[in-house]
Amino acid sequence: MSIDKVARIAGVSTATVSRVLNGNPAVKPDTRDKVLAAIEACEYQPNLLARQLRTSRSRMLLVLVSNITNPFCARVVRGIEEEAEKHGYHILLCNSESRLTRESAYLRLLSGKVVDGVITMDAISCLPGLTTLIGDSPWVQCGEGDPGYNASSVTIDNFKAASAAVDHLMTSGYKRIALINGDLRYLYSQQREAGYRAASGKNWQAVVYADSLEYQAGIQAMAELFTLPEPPDAVFAISDALAGGALHYAHEQGLHVPEDVAIMGFDGVPFGSVTYPPLTTIEQPMHQLGVRSVQLLLERIDNPEVETVNEILDWKLLVRGSV
């Protein structure tokens, strides 16, 4: 199907179709919508190789995530993909599972110009030696905000959010507040634990480390906490998936939530609103994290000399029935 037919269906010039395909921001929104509708109607596929040779761009972005089954990652990736498409880009998604060979193979696409830039959601310390492969290529850290690298970043203030979670539990009358944490290679895990410890002060503390962010790992971590001589009366988990597992364990043991033990999560993924009881949590702006990651990356692609940006987005405390 030719670009001429797309133009005829949309009632615009071929030059306008070309501008839409290349993500030109000067195209009016209603015109862009007409062209996109025409493209969909006639299933037009542009010659991406020819375009790359002509523009020196692939209009592809590499997105590197550690675990796409994590509902937080999935929501962020939706935001990334939607924003990329608005600018005429597509994404190449790598579910790395922190495997060095897989990450290395995908990052080599940067030097081959198969992708124009990379968004990483994996911990930088999980990318040993791979920062060399990224080099000076356009790069944004999403959910991790380490300013020590030549990359822009977008995240939240994890320390303050975790502190607020503990403060809420303490204000609600809980005395023995435990933390279920995850992999300390991630900055957010370090920052949330620091916030927990700072807010707890000299009060009772207990921390267990889940071996993943999976639901089952939350069950196991909660079971470990309840082997303590004095178990917690409140549990703060660094992800809603872990908190969901903690809820499951409580129900399995005949514990009433929040009367016997309060449970609080982190992320604000949709399933937290339908658990029993609904999960109190720290809500991250997941979609906006994805959107801003793309926007910052495209700024770097368009102008490699632009200063790196370390952006902090707002979060909010969602109070529901589990506290």
Image: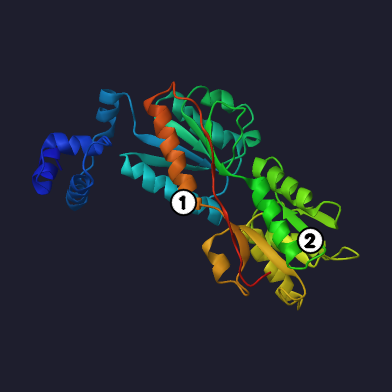
Q: Quickly name the residue at label 2.
A: 177
Q: Quadrant of residue 298?
A: top left
Q: From where the camera sits, is residue 200 visible?
A: yes
Apparent side of residue 170 relative to residue 3 in the rendered image (left or right):
right
The numbered disc on residue 187 is: none
Which residue is tagged 1? 287
Amino acid at the residue labelled 2 = Ile
Classify residue 70 as left or right of residue 165: left
- In the rendered image, which quarter is residue 295 located in? top left
SS label for mark 2: strand
Outermost residue on the front side: it is 171
Labels 1 and 2: the sequence-earlier one = 2
Pinpoint residue 125: horizontal percent, then vertical percent. 66, 34
SS at badge 1:
helix
Between the C-alphas of marks 1 and 2, the distance is 30 Å
Amino acid on which the number 1 mark rests in the picture: His
**Quarter of the image that includes the C terminus:** bottom right
Colour scheme employed for the rendering of this structure: rainbow
For this rendering, which residue is in front, 43 or 300? Answer: 300
In the shown orientation, is residue 31 left or right of residue 23?
left
**Is the residue 116 above or below the residue 2 in the image?**
above
**Residue 179 placement: quadrant:** bottom right
